[in-house]
Amino acid sequence: MVDAIDLTGDGGVTKMVLRSAKPGALAPSEDLPLVDVHYEGVLAETGEVFDTTREDNTIFSFELGRGAVIKAWDIALKTMKVGELAKITCQPEYAYGIAGSPPDIPPNATLIFEVELVACRPHKGLTPSTVSEQKAKLEELKKQREMAASAKEEEKKRREEAKAAAAARVQAKMEAKKGQGRGKGKAK
């Protein structure tokens, strides 16, 4: 069996792979943020099961990174691939902590979950290719906006330079007229 991997650097969330995903399996990402999982949660202190999808073979679905689940799940599931089964140990500060615990979980409980990542999907109505296409379109629009802003800035700079040059010509003419006026006055 493989040793547990410390995902947070402080031992707050550890993951032990119980079954690896097949090569080339999908992983959650920005394009595939919706995940479906099977899981069973037990209290580390007693080994008592407090929640499971296995009894009724249901799927639990949520979006990663939105705070819909405990912090440990957002962290651990980002490291998994479809088909992977892992044991995730969550210290209280990455689980429910003191406040906000469901009634069947004691305060400051360390939780252990056996989680299987069943699927990861894009938002409803999107496919991975449409998400990528949308990102590409947004990038193109961003580039176009940047180019337009740059062209606008360049035009503004040209207008200011032309204005300054015109002001300098007017100033030079005025200086020249002042000089001519003095000369004529002295001649009389």
Image (cartoon, rainbow, N blue to C red):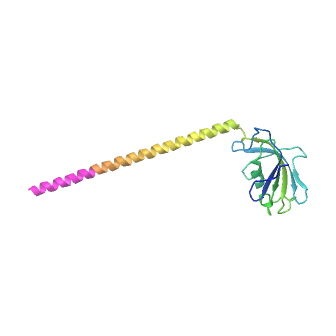
Q: Residue at x 36, y 48 (%)?
A: 161
Q: Residue at x 39, y 45 (%)?
A: 158
Q: How many marks?
A: 0
- Give the image location of residue 183, x and y in percent: 14, 55
Instruction: Let me know if residue 70 appears in the view.
Output: no
Magenta highlight on residue 23: no
Instruction: Let me know if residue 118 appears in the view.
Output: yes
Q: Residue at x 31, y 51 (%)?
A: 167
Please state if 9 lies on the left or on the right of 108 as rendered: left
Q: Quadrant of the C terminus?
A: bottom left
The residue range painted magenta reads: 170-188
- Give the image location of residue 71, x and y in percent: 76, 55
- Give the image location of residue 88, x and y in percent: 82, 52
- Give the image location of residue 151, x and y in percent: 46, 43
Please state if 31 lies on the left or on the right of 115 as rendered: left
Foreground of the two, 78 or 184: 78
Q: What is the magenta segment's predominant secondary structure?
A: helix
Q: Residue at x 63, y 40 (%)?
A: 135
Foreground of the two, 80 or 151: 80
